[in-house]
Image (spheres, helix red, strand yellow):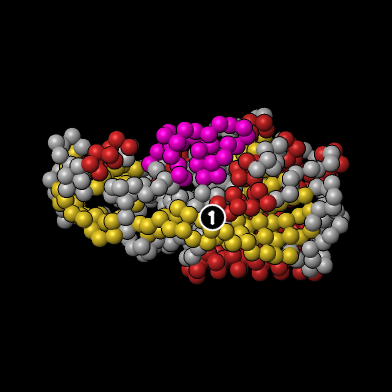
């Protein structure tokens, strides 16, 4: 097992608990924090031509206790 | 402790002593992105071949492997390349236009004059509409429009990403046209539009690939590493290699499992699930999550191609210890982290009440033909593998403090 030491370059810059309610930008299927996330939002989520919030796409059960978006605002992945 | 196999293989042990191998992971990415897997869409021969290949890899790594089939509905499938011509100009699929997932199936080209939404009658016309909202679709159906052309953005390279999961098929032909081109079509009103949308909604069978390295002893820590191996599948005339999403994540999970297994303390459970149908709506994990033992810690990797500024991490379920572990692992390995939406299989496990995190490190060319293996960085694969293994090791080292796992 690795010896546990800390560095200042890695880990969360802010409060890790924010990961329970992450920002909704780049919120579509499999989205990640890179350029394609922006294009997803611009291009529409899951082919619906509409950007939607984090909890309303593929795997659409609420994550981290967040409430799902109404289908009318996104309608992603059914 | 009940082990699922006699123990780490010599080859796996040698790999572990060497640490994670970028070359090995890049080879996995190249393999899964190869032509023979045809973009690995759920239910296709290519998808099934990828599942079989992954099963072989898990067996070789020392896991007891099972394949778990499940039925999936609502998958969008192109029967041929959609067509769109405006006057003499043939537009290019996935560059200029793309199928809209609520469209009716229109297998043969249908012609009609191009008309603005403000025109008096939509009958027989292809209508330039601002969107495909219910009111617009209702009018198009009622007035028997030829179809709707709605705007949609493209990615920074000018591609319109492919999706295969979406709302139910509607009654009207709809194509998405690149936003700037959609605006330009306003200068071509009256020209003849000829278009087809040969897209069906099908029911098909997916296959999850499960590898158990070691079952957890009673009350001991149980860990599941997951990554979806499916892609959106090739277009009829165009490849979608799906190297970043998610051959890269599969490569990381496979390598991390190999490394962890060689040094796994007795009693700790370690399993891998390579999931099918994520692109169809996270169907493989939806099938698997309810069958998983309560308290299992789930780490899902979706995208490990270009780290950029920081890895995205989303937590769900009772994941506080898991989140603390990944934070410590990030500090230990020097991988910067940030809270970021990971709308992937991790959400299915979290919704089932399991502690789950999703980790994402970039998907260049996301769901386009440009999602090629050469864009997957070896350094990012290593960073992701180190983060996952360090997270697991932190959990193991602190497992006594976690209390009795349910």
Decide which of B257, B158 is in the foreground and name it.
B257
Q: Residue at x 34, y 47 (%)?
A: B170
Q: Is residue B64 left or right of residue B145?
A: right
Neighbour class for label 1 at 10 Å: few (<14), some, many (≥20)? many
Element marked by disc 1: loop
Q: Is residue B142 above or below residue B267?
A: above
Between residues B352 and A37, which one lies in front from this camera angle?
B352
Q: Which residue is mark 1?
A: B277
Left or right of B34 on screen, residue B200: left
Q: Which of the 4 quarters of the picture holds residue A23?
A: top right
| Residue drawn where x is 16% and y is 51% of the image | B112
Residue B313, x across and y down, in percent: 62, 40
Chain under label 1?
A: B
Coordinates of residue B283 in the picture (x, y in percent): 55, 52
At 15% across and 37% down in the image, what residue appears? Answer: B119
| Magenta residues (range) | A49-78
Q: Residue furthest front?
A: B142
Instruction: Reply above or below: B278 against B179.
Output: below
Q: Along the line of sight, which residue is nearer the eye, B214 or B326?
A: B214
- Residue B338 in sight here: no
Q: Is residue A36 magenta?
A: no
The secondary structure that dominates the magenta segment is loop
Q: Nearer the viewer, residue A29 or B206?
A: B206
């Amino acid at each position: 097992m690795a010896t546990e030491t800390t560095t200042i370059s890695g880990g969360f810059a802010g409060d890790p608990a924010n990961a329970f309610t992450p920002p909704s930008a780049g919120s579509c299927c499999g989205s990640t924090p890179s350029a394609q996330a922006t294009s997803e939002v611009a291009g529409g989520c899951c082919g619906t031509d509409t950007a939607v919030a984090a909890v309303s796409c593929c795997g659409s059960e609420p994550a981290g206790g967040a409430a799902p978006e109404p289908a009318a605002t996104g309608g992603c992945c059914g | 402790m009940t082990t699922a196999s006699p123990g780490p293989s010599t080859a796996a042990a040698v790999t572990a002593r060497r640490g994670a191998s970028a070359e090995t992971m890049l080879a996995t990415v190249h393999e899964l992105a190869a032509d023979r897997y045809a973009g690995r869409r759920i239910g296709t021969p290519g998808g099934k071949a990828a599942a079989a290949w992954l099963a072989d890899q898990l067996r070789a790594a020392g896991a007891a492997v099972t394949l778990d089939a499940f039925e999936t509905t609502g998958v969008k499938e192109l029967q041929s390349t959609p067509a769109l011509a405006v006057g003499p100009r043939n537009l290019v699929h996935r560059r200029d236009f793309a199928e809209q997932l609520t469209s009716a199936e229109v297998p043969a080209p249908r012609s009609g004059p191009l008309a603005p939404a403000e025109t008096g009658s939509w009958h027989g016309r292809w209508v330039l509409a601002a969107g495909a909202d219910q009111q617009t679709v209702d009018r198009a159906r009622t007035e028997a429009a030829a179809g709707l052309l709605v705007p949609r953005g493209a990615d920074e390279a000018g591609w319109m990403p492919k999706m295969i999961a979406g709302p139910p098929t509607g009654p009207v032909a709809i194509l998405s046209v690149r936003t700037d081109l959609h605006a330009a079509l306003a200068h071509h009103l009256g020209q003849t539009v000829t278009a087809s949308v040969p897209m069906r909604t099908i029911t098909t069978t997916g296959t999850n690939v499960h590898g158990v390295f070691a079952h957890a002893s009673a009350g001991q820590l149980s860990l599941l590493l997951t990554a979806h191996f499916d892609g959106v599948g090739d277009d009829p005339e165009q490849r979608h290699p799906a190297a970043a999403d998610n051959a890269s994540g599969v490569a990381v999970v496979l390598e991390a499992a190999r490394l962890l297994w060689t040094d796994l303390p007795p009693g700790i459970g370690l399993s891998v699930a390579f999931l099918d149908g994520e692109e169809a709506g996270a169907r493989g994990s939806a099938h698997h999550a309810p069958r998983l033992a309560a308290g299992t810690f789930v780490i899902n990797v979706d995208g490990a191609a270009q780290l950029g500024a920081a890895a995205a991490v989303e937590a769900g379920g009772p994941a506080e210890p898991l989140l603390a572990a990944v934070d410590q692992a990030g500090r230990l390995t020097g991988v910067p982290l940030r809270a970021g939406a990971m709308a992937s299989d991790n959400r299915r496990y979290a919704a089932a009440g399991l502690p789950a995190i999703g980790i994402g490190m970039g998907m260049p060319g996301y769901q386009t033909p440009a999602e090629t293996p050469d864009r997957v960085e070896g350094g990012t694969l290593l960073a992701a593998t180190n983060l996952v293994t360090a997270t697991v090791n932190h959990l193991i080292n602190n497992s006594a403090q976690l209390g009795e796992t349910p």
